[in-house]
Amino acid sequence: MRDGSNRCSKHQREAWAKKPTATKRTTGRKLQAMRAALFRRQPLCPECTKLGLVVLATQRDHIVSLEEGGADDDTNTQGLCQEHHDAKSLAERLRARRRGQL
């Protein structure tokens, strides 16, 4: 019997659920103000800068992901371009999968 997950009953994966100990994300106007301040302080993607490129940071990134215990404050954020943010997010998801969290 299949449940639409493309997995048979012997190989089901637990549904993802946020950990009760997960850091609460900042939202709303406070988040928008934090993003604006971050991009004023750090307008360029530091990873692109290391490569000698000048690319605007467009994504607010947690240096240590919230899932891995990072704080949702200015001490744990950096601005990244979309490409570097996507690559870092993929690496974080793969680490979580290896740990059995996804």
Image: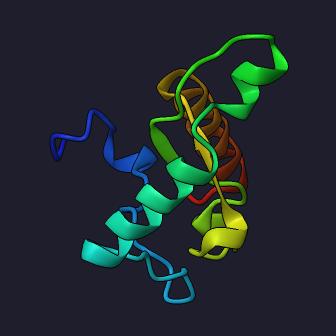
Q: Nearer the viewer, residue 5 or 8?
A: 5
Q: Nearer the viewer, residue 55 or 73?
A: 55
Give the vertical position of 4 relative to 20 (above or below): above
Looking at the rendering, in which quadrant would you find the N terminus?
A: top left
Give the vertical position of 49 relative to 58 (above or below): above
Extreme front residue here? 40
Q: Residue at x 64, y 39 (%)?
A: 94
Q: Is residue 16 visible?
A: yes
Percent x, y for residue 102?
52, 53
Q: Residue at x 56, y 74 (%)?
A: 72
Percent x, y for residue 73?
60, 75
Please indicate whether residue 30 sits to the left or right of residue 48 in the image.
Answer: left
Give the vertical position of 87 relative to 66 (above or below): above
Q: Is residue 61 visible?
A: no
Q: How many marks?
A: 0
Q: Residue at x 62, y 53 (%)?
A: 41
Percent x, y for residue 101?
59, 60
Please indicate whether residue 27 sits to the left or right of residue 3 in the image.
Answer: right
Extreme top residue here? 52
Q: Nearer the viewer, residue 96 or 61?
A: 61
Q: Quadrant of residue 48?
A: top right
